[in-house]
Amino acid sequence: MESTLVNLEPGLYIVPTPIGNMDDITIRSRRVLSACQAIACEDTRRTGQLLKKLNIPKKRMISYHEHNEQESGKYIAGEIDKGLSVALVSDAGTPGISDPGYRLVREAIDSGISIFSLPGPTAFVPALVASGFPTNSFLFLGFPPQKKGRKSFIRDALSQPFTTVLYESPHRINKFFAELIDSGNGDREICIAREISKIFEEYIRGTALEIQNELSPDRNLKGEIVIVVKARKH
């Protein structure tokens, strides 16, 4: 389906992009990406590939990632002040969720720039809903620290009286479950989700100990993993 080109007023447009299935792109997101004058992105090559798949002509790309966020954020705000419409995208999902996008939003707010936040794909919401755990209240914590503060982070996550959602790298998932079990939480009910919206989408449900037994060290997991932890019983 072709998107109708629209005129965008100057501002920062926060545009979610598919986390797997390309059909998850919204009509509005396509229209904004087609009509914007520049795109701020983590990886210009990856975003270029996305535009090609969506049949959107090449755009001016502005690199924005955790290593240049301060300098690039001020530059982007300055360009919008000149009258540009700039779309902010991450490599996948909704910008600002466990990435430096929120700092650009803060820069735009401080500069009095209009912000348009589009709804769309993000990994933790489908994982949370499919977990089967209560969703009336939940806590999203993002990625645990890799080293310093990791033990206390996980301890705090496990102590919450409501459903808790985390992200973890496939390279550290076995370590994560070993840490849970070593802390006496082998019986905690957990759901992990991976490859959401992709061909090999998978949900694994059970206690921490049961999931650890299923995640043998030689199993080659790929993609970002969402961990949903059921609230502690009191």
Image (spheres, grey):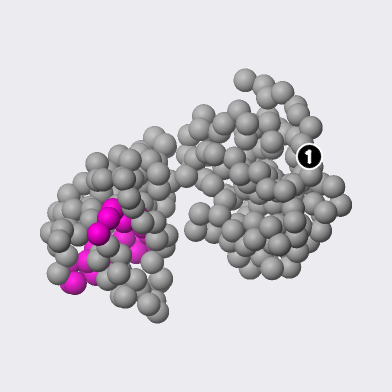
Q: Farthest residue toward the bottom?
A: 148
Instruction: State whether residue 5 appears in this view.
Output: yes
Note whether 149 is above or below 99 in the view shown: below
The magenta stretch spans residue 11? no
Note whether 9 is above or below 3 in the view shown: below
Residue 85 x, y percent position in the rendering: 77, 44
Residue assigned mark 1: 9
The magenta stretch spans residue 171? yes
Note whether 106 is above or below 82 in the view shown: below
Q: Which residues are magenta?
A: 161-183
Residue 216 x, y percent position in the rendering: 22, 56
Q: Is residue 104 left or right of residue 147?
A: right
Instruction: State whether residue 216 appears in this view.
Output: no
Q: Nearer the viewer, residue 31 or 115?
A: 115
Residue 210 x, y percent position in the rendering: 15, 54
Instruction: Kindly identify the residue that appears in the image at 25 percent across and 66 percent down.
Output: 159
For residue 234, which quarter of the picture?
bottom left
Q: Report crowding for label 1: few under 14, some 14 to 19, many 20 or more residues within 10 A (C-alpha).
A: some
Q: Is residue 74 left or right of residue 91?
A: right
At label 1, which amino acid type do we have?
Glu
Q: Is residue 112 left or right of residue 27?
A: right
Instruction: Kindly identify the residue that appears in the image at 72 percent across and 34 percent down.
Output: 34
Secondary structure found at label 1 = loop
Quadrant assignment for the N terminus: top right
Residue 135 x, y percent position in the rendering: 31, 45
Instruction: Kindly identify the residue that appears in the image at 80 percent across and 52 percent down.
Output: 80
